Structures are given as structure tokens and as C-alpha cells.
Image (cartoon, rainbow, N blue to C red):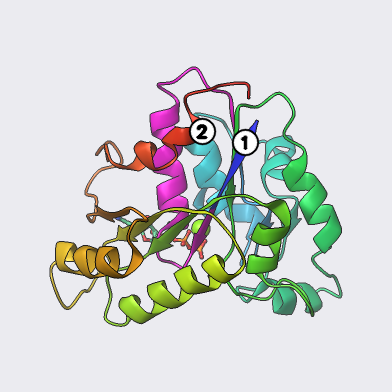
Amino acid sequence: MTTVFVTASGTEVGKTFVMCKLLTELRRTTLSVRAVKPVATGFDPNDIEASDTGHLLAAQNLRPTAARVDAVTPWRYAAALSPDMAARREARIVPFEDLLSFCRRSEGFDLTLIEGIGGVMVPLDERHTVIDWIAALGAPALLVTGSYLGTLSHTLTAAEALRRRDVELLGIVASESPEQPVALDETRRVLERFLAPTPVIALPRQRSDADAIPELLPLIAPFLDAPGT
Ligand SMILES: Nc1ncnc2c1ncn2[C@@H]1O[C@H](COP(=O)(O)OP(=O)(O)OP(=O)(O)O)[C@@H](O)[C@H]1O
Ligand SMILES: [Mg+2]
């Protein structure tokens, strides 16, 4: 049993997109995979299909029943804000220890994919940010970033923060932003130069869900060789 944490340099850069691509490719393997997005904000129970939870279930060919939504995303908040702020508006909190226990509850699965929320240091409560969550789990991370103007500093800052907390960085996925100042590969090459030997892959803007990304699965390949371990 192993866990990979999918985090990002910021919100809306492509974590769910990458999770869904990985899930689609993993369906061609014999691995049993648990995919969770434990904390979601901006969650609308009347439009689950449009939520990250709905997307993760759809990528596994699963209908979003109430039980499945609870199993994928136990902590859901209405306001589209950071988790600490969204929870506070409902007089609730994100219970950090319960969150860790939930993430560790992966018996029977070969691989657990966890989508974080926002960027690496978005606050979860008054004391913890996402990076505390990743470090406490001791999980290796995939860092999803964009190719917008400003991404170089955001990405290098996020990678440095993870490194300082001894989080193993499996790879960077530069997901093409709707607007970018240079070709995607130029951004990829600059990131690669600063982050070597961590692999950096470019994920072009996809036109169809069916488009395959052959470089993606190899980023977590160390965990795919030995199912059940
Ligand atoms: N490479 C890509 N090609 C096409 N669309 C993309 C790509 N990357 C991201 N998107 C789209 O951009 C939007 C934001 O991506 P996504 O929802 O995956 O971001 P996120 O990091 O999970 O955001 P959040 O912080 O809200 O969880 C989505 O509509 C997604 O489908
Ligand atoms: Mg998401």
C-alpha cells in the first residue's frame, strides 16, 4: 500500500485534471486504487458532477452516490475560500488529526491518490497548512503547476517549501494555462534546469478527455511495480 499526494503551486492549475488522467491510465493496470479529495470548498451538493469529487468518481466510471461522495470527500464546505475560512463560516473546522487518519485508512488498496486543496501552503485551520498535511503523512508528492506568467517563481517556491519539509518530490507537471507568455516547453525546460534531477513534464492543453499523456504514469512508476506492497 502506498500513497501519492497531488498538490499544486496554487488553485485551479490542474490537480483534478492530473488526478483524472492518472485514474484513467491506472484503469489499464491491475492495481486497486483509492482516489480521494478529502477537503473541498465551494462545494455545491446540487451539482456534484461539476465538483472535484464528481470528476474523480467519473474518471473511475462510478456514479456519485451519497456514500461514495462521503468516502471521497468527507469534509465539504460551501464557501469557495481557503478551508480554514470556509469552515469558519459554517462554525466548523477541518479536523487535522481526523484528516490524517482518513488518509491513512487505505487497507486493501495498492495505491492511494490524494488530491490536496489549493496550493502547498493554503491554511487548513488556524495552525496547519497543506504542507503540514503532506509532511505528516510522509507521502511523496506530485506538484502540478501552470504555464502562466509568474509560474516560475510560484513553482520553484512551492518545490523549495516541499524540499525543506523533506517531502519527496516525484515530479512536476506543468499543465498548460489558458494564457501563457511563451511556449509550454520553454517553461518546462527552465523548471527542469532549476529542479533537476526531479522530472518535469509538460501537459499541453487537452482538447479531449481521451488524449493520453504517456509521461504521466511513469512519474509514479516506482509505486506501480510492486502491487500489494
Ligand atoms: N492541461 C489541461 N488541458 C485542458 N484543461 C485543463 C488542463 N489543466 C487544467 N484544465 C482545466 O482547468 C480547470 C482547472 O483545473 P483543475 O480543476 O484540475 O484544477 P485544480 O488544481 O484541481 O483546482 P482546485 O484548486 O479548485 O482543486 C478545469 O476546468 C480543468 O479541466
Ligand atoms: Mg481540484
The residue positioned 78% from the left and 53% from the top of the image is 100
Picture layout, residue 40 above or below residue 57: below
Coordinates of residue 128 in the picture (x, y in percent) = 74, 73
Picture layout, residue 59 above or below residue 201: above
Q: Which residue is situated farthest in the left direction here?
A: 183
**Residues under numbered marks 2 and 1 in contact, where contact means CB atoms less than 8 Å apart:** yes
Which numbered circle lies on residue 2? Answer: 1
Span of residues in magenta: 6-33
Mark 1: amino acid: Thr
In depth, the one of 61 and 199 nearer the eye is 199
Location of residue 24 (image quadrant): top left
Coordinates of residue 59 in the picture (x, y in percent) = 46, 36
In depth, the one of 73 and 157 nearer the eye is 157
Which numbered circle lies on residue 223? Answer: 2
Coordinates of residue 78 in the picture (x, y in percent) = 68, 68
Q: Residues within 10 Å of mark 2 (few under 14, many from 20)?
A: some
Q: Secondary structure at mark 1?
A: strand
Mark 2: amino acid: Phe
The first of marks 2 and 1 along the sequence is 1
Location of residue 216 (image quadrant): top left
